[in-house]
Structures are given as C-alpha cells and as structure tokens.
Image: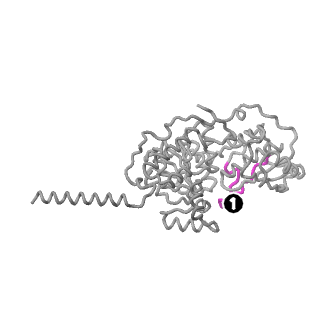
Amino acid sequence: MVALSVKSLFTILVVSLALLLAIILLAPSSPFSQISLPFNSPLKSDIWTVRRIVEWRPCKWWLQGDLTALPVETNGYIRVDCYGGLNQMRRDLCDGVSIARLLNATLVLPKFEVAAYWNESSGFADVFDVEYFIRQMNGFVKVVKELPSEIASKEPFRVDCSKRRGQFDYVESVLPSLLEHNYISITPAMSQRRDRYPLYAKAALCQACYSALRLTRSLKKKASELLEAIPKPFLSLHLRFEPDMVAYSRCEYSGLSSASINTIEAARGDRKPWTGELARIWRKRGRCPLTPNETAFILQALSIPTNTNIYLAAGDGLMELEGLTSVYTNVVTKSSLLTGEDFTSMHGNTKAALDYHVSINSDSYVATYFGNMDKMVAAMRALKGLYKTLFLSRRAFAEFTSQGFRGKDLMQALWKAHRDDYVMGRGSALPDCFCEFTL
C-alpha cells in the first residue's frame, strides 16, 4: 500500500512537471522570457574589463596649439539667445562662441530663454561662474558683462541663423548685419559644419564647452554634497523614458501600465504613433527610447552586476521605473538623497546641473540616449581620463529582437554589439574637439 502511494505520488509529480514544461514552451515568446528567472551571464566579467583599442583625447591644437591673436578692433557685439534644457543651451552657447570668433565680435553674456521649457527664470549667472568664464575665454574671444553706454539701452537686432551652418554662411549673411547694427542676437542652428571652421574658431568653441563653464560656488557645493552621498563605487545611468520623450518618438509599446499609456496619450497631441511597416522601420532605426525594463535587460547582458550602485540621472516624470528597480535594487535619485526642502525648491536647470556634475565624476556612465547631456558628459569624461562610458544601442536591440533573438541568445548578441562599440570608443567624445588615439 505504501509502495503504491509512493508510485502514485511520483506519477503525479512527473505529469505536473511535464505540464509545466509544456506551458513554458508554448507560451508566447518575449525578449525578456528569461529575465524573471535567476540569470547568470555566460560572460565572466563586465563590459568595463574589455580592452579598448581606441580612445578619444583632447586635440593638441586646442590645448597646446598657438592661438591666433585676437584683432584689436571688434566688429560689434553678439548676444547668444539659448533655448531649451540646460545642456541644449550649453550647446547653443558653445556654437555662439565660435561664431563670435569667426566674425571677430565681442561676446555679451548669453541670455537663457528657459521660462517656456522649465517654467522658471534662472539665467546664465544663476548656473555658471561668470568671472571664471570670462577669464577662461581670454585669448579665445572677448567677453563682456556690460555693453558700452551708447548701446546699453538698446535691444539687439535679431538675426535669423536657422539656415546658417558654416563659416561662409556667417561671413556672407550675418556679418553685414553685425556691421550695420553693431549689436545683434543669434541662436545657432542645431547642426553646424564645425569641421570647416578655422582652428582658432574651433578652439574657442572647445574652450567654452569644456574648460570655461564652471558651476557657481553655491551650486558646486550642493553638487559635491550630492556626489558624496552616493554609495561608492557607482554607475550613473541617464535614463530617458518620460511621456514627452515617448510621445515625440511616435513609438508604441506593449505591456505599459494604464497610467503610463494615459500620460503618453496626453502628451502626444497631433503626433500620432507610426503603425504597420513604418513603425517597424522606425524602431529598427533605433528611434524608440528604451524602457526601464529593456535597459535592465541590456545591463544584465553587459554583465553589470544587479547589486551595482546606480545613480539615476533623469528628469521628472520617468515612467515604468519598476522595470529597472525590480532587477537593479540599489538605485538612488536626487530626490532620495537630498532633503525635501532642497529638492522642491530646485529649478529644472539646477537639477540638470546636479545630474551633469555627478555623471562626469561617476565611476562609470551609461546612457540610453545620445542627446545633448550625453554628448557633453562623454566628452568631459574623456577630458578627465574617465573612459568607462557607454551608450546603449537602441538600434541593436530593435534589430536583434526583430530577428527573433530571445533570452540568452539576445543577451549574447547585445554583448557583442556593445563590446565592439566600447572597444572602438564609439560615441565616447565629440570629434569637434577630441582626436582618436590608438592604444
């Protein structure tokens, strides 16, 4: 009787296991079908242990080259009007500095047009050390805090630079306005032909971007306190999955919470998501932001330990964060490390400046996007000799998943793709001011 009971129990156990196996095998496949199971990467070490072949370092013509002397007489005054988030405004300023040098103009302190974007009123002097900026730009371009009395009360003549890209565009189209009005304002176009600038103008841009912009003393103190509070060593992760970001991408996602879906729909406006073949092509081009869940999956593919200390460099409104924190449990944010009073009183520019400072000083930096902040951070890290910098490939992820890669096969493919990027130093610095160095 006892033997029969044991035999029966054994039969029940075998049948149960068979049913469970059938359910697993027949269930709809997902790129993350194995991510909820205990996973040990087939790779013994993380991505940072891979030997690099190429590094980007500051070009000698910038740091050690002889500067072309500034002309004695100026052609007039230029104010750069900067729009958007902090790092976009920083990019506009850098381009504006090089344009001022091209046109032999004196640079007036830039105007940060931030109200429309951040709903705040902080300006250049609220974020950056003005006196330091002027000193560091000495010899590259002349900078003044105040205009001469004869034009101080006048508004600058606005010059449209939306279609200006290179040196001759500015000389032929903008210089005449500068000579006529003596004081103009410009906003550089997003895509500049900096590669065609003379070295003295490129050097001015590089100096402005990477040597002359230092946080104000009070902001630097707050940033240092935040950096000190983060558990060490740590990885700074710039994660972009906010409603406006997703809405602007025109991508659709399955498996999001109803709250996230509603928030995205509210942000879409007239930008309807792509559908059908267009949606597939768009995603394979790497146009769709990585979700926190996808980000966690790729980090695991790169053998980044799940107990890694991660500082989340991200804006407000990040969605689906539990997709990351359910896998990587040691995630900290500004709001978790700063006092409630400090955090709630901060403007958007202040928060962005803190993220930037922490990221350029982190042990490693990973970005899910290749935006203005990521480019600036990567270049500054290269300047400081910090090469553990990597941009997660949305294109590779979309390509491999569209080919049916799943689980460990997907992880292996992602490892190889990112390893190749890291070995060759792709995206680790802006080539305008940095030169390739073969190790």
Q: Secondary structure at mark 1?
A: helix
Residue 61 pos. (x, y %): 72, 33
As drawn, 58 above or below 116: above
Residue 181 pos. (x, y %): 88, 52
Residue at the location (74% across, 44% down)?
194
Provide the residue span drawn in magenta: 107-127
* Total marks in image: 1
Left or right: residue 369 versus residue 256 is right
Residue 144 at least partly seen: no
Q: The C terminus is located in which quarter?
A: top right
As drawn, 265 above or below 68: below
Q: Is residue 199 magenta?
A: no
Residue 196 at least partly seen: yes
Residue 7 pos. (x, y %): 16, 57
Within 10 angstroms of label 1, few (less than 14), some, or many (20 or more) residues?
Answer: few
Q: Which residue is mark 1?
A: 115
Q: The N terminus is located in which quarter?
A: bottom left
**Image coloring type:** one colour
Q: Is residue 116 magenta?
A: yes
Residue at the location (54% across, 42% down)?
362
Amino acid type assigned to the residue bearing label 1 in the image: Ala
Residue at the location (63% across, 68% down)?
269
